[in-house]
Image (spheres, coloured by chain):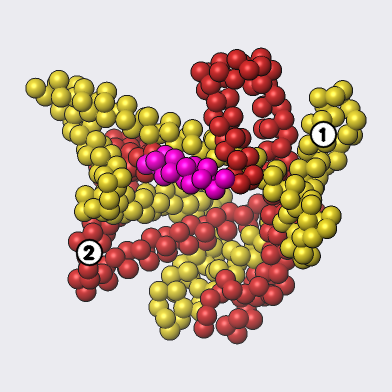
Chain colours: A yellow, B red
Amino acid sequence: MTGIEILQIWIAAFFTLAIFSFLYRDNAVYKFAEHIFAGLSAGYYVGLIWKSVIIQQLWEPMTRADNPKWYLFIPGIIGALMFARLIPRISWVSRLALAFVMGNTAGVFIISQLHGLILPQMQDTMLPLLNGGFAGSLLAFITVIGVISTLVYFYFSKEHTGALGVTARVGVWFIMISFGAHFGYTVMGRVSLLIGRVYFLYNDWIGSLSHIF
Amino acid sequence: MRTTVPVIIAFLSGIVMIVSFFFNPDRTILGQIESEVLVWVTIVGGFTLLLGVVSITRVNFRSVRLQKEGWFFNLLTLISIFVMAIPSILPVSWSPLFGDREGSIYDWLFTNVDSIMMQTMFGLLAFYIASAAYRAFRARNAEATILLLTAVLVMLWRVPMGEAFLRLFSDDLPQWINSYVMNGANMSVQRGIIIGAALGAASMSLRILLGIERTYMGKG
């Protein structure tokens, strides 16, 4: 193990312990790590956008020798208009860029939500109920009842009383089952990460001591 | 002028995307426009994210300049932003430490500091999830019980030791959880939520295109 590798392990161990120190209470060491984390994350996005958007999608296609897309200066200028938001006197100019993004996203969303989500999901729900024996039929019934009752639970235009109330109540039970499943998965994911960090501290960090002393 | 022009731009840019969906991208100009405009949106969206970073920098810079309470931590954030961002945008031809390749400052900081803290932050949540589960259990109503029972079953089902434990009750129990809990009840709720959210998103999109929804413009 080289000196640089040991230094890397100790830096990582310091930040791991600094974050874990929040379990005791909010303290200066945690704040130190937290603010560095926030800054590095913001800086990470600068690097990511610089390469994947500004260079690869804007600069390189505009300046390449073979079939240059010179007209890409238009979205470049529209994007630059966003920065007008920082100058109060002309901040309204940034709305032009924002409107372009919002309108475009809205246009894409209408099609993608209807064509890509609502219709396929409804198509997969509207299947024969009595098909594939007892197990298949039970699954089909659970699916149909679950979808309808969930939709009814999120329907707020009418008071949840009578048949609507009963259906919404069934919807709550289904939703609790789904949330429970997600809760289980989330706990497992987080515990898995925790085990990873504890393993790092025990194996790599404590292990590095034998190389130092 | 300040609101009408943005509404017209939003309408036109949205309509282009809707109409071009009905045209063949290989044979018609309108179809080709769709993919080109998507690139434009990615570029403008990139600038939007950069604006966010500039905004964070300004807020922290102001705190440092006025020496507000905790300004030292704001200074740390500023230094971190610059240490991560500036080497990443400098050309690799100047130094192998620049750019975002393996061995660069950007890559080293991401691997050894940023991602480490990200993992630890999420790992930290395991403790708070445990306390949330305890509070849910104390609620002692039918819904909380269903939620916890499902969570426990799923957690047991996903690990080999838990699956062996479930098989003590019935050999079919793990398969039953997979079929009826995950692919049955769970999937049907996900489907209901997806349909509901997609309908909401589509109607909101229509409101934006028609200029009814203007809150994204802010005030002024």
Identify the residue shown where x is 44% and y is 37%. Answer: A190
Q: Which chain hosts label 1?
A: A
Asked whether B7 falls inside the magenta stretch, the response is no
Under tag 1, what secondary structure?
A: helix
Q: Which residue is mark 1?
A: A140
- B88 lies left or right of A52: left
Disc 1 packing (10 Å; few <14; some 14–19; many ≥20): many
B17 to A56, vertically: above or below: below
Residue A140 image point, x, y percent: 82, 34
In the depicted view, which residue is nearer to us: A186 or A56? A186
For marks 2 and 1, give the one nearer the viewer: 1
- A63 lies left or right of A158: left
A106 to A88, vertically: above or below: above
Q: Which residue is mark 2?
A: B70
Task: Judge whether residue B209 can be spotted in this image.
Answer: no
Work out which quarter of the rendered image holds the N terminus of chain B and state it: bottom right
The magenta span reads: B124-140
Q: Which chain hosts label 2?
A: B
Q: What is the three-letter code of the residue carrying label 2?
A: Gly
Residue B18 image point, x, y percent: 75, 59
Identify the residue shown where x is 68% and y is 59%. Answer: B201
- A24 lies left or right of B28: left
Q: Main secondary structure of the magenta part?
A: helix
Residue A12 image point, x, y percent: 26, 37
Q: What is the three-letter code of the residue carrying label 1?
A: Ala
In the depicted view, which residue is nearer to us: A75 or A119? A119
- A189 lies left or right of A168: left
Identify the residue shown where x is 43% and y is 33%. Answer: A191
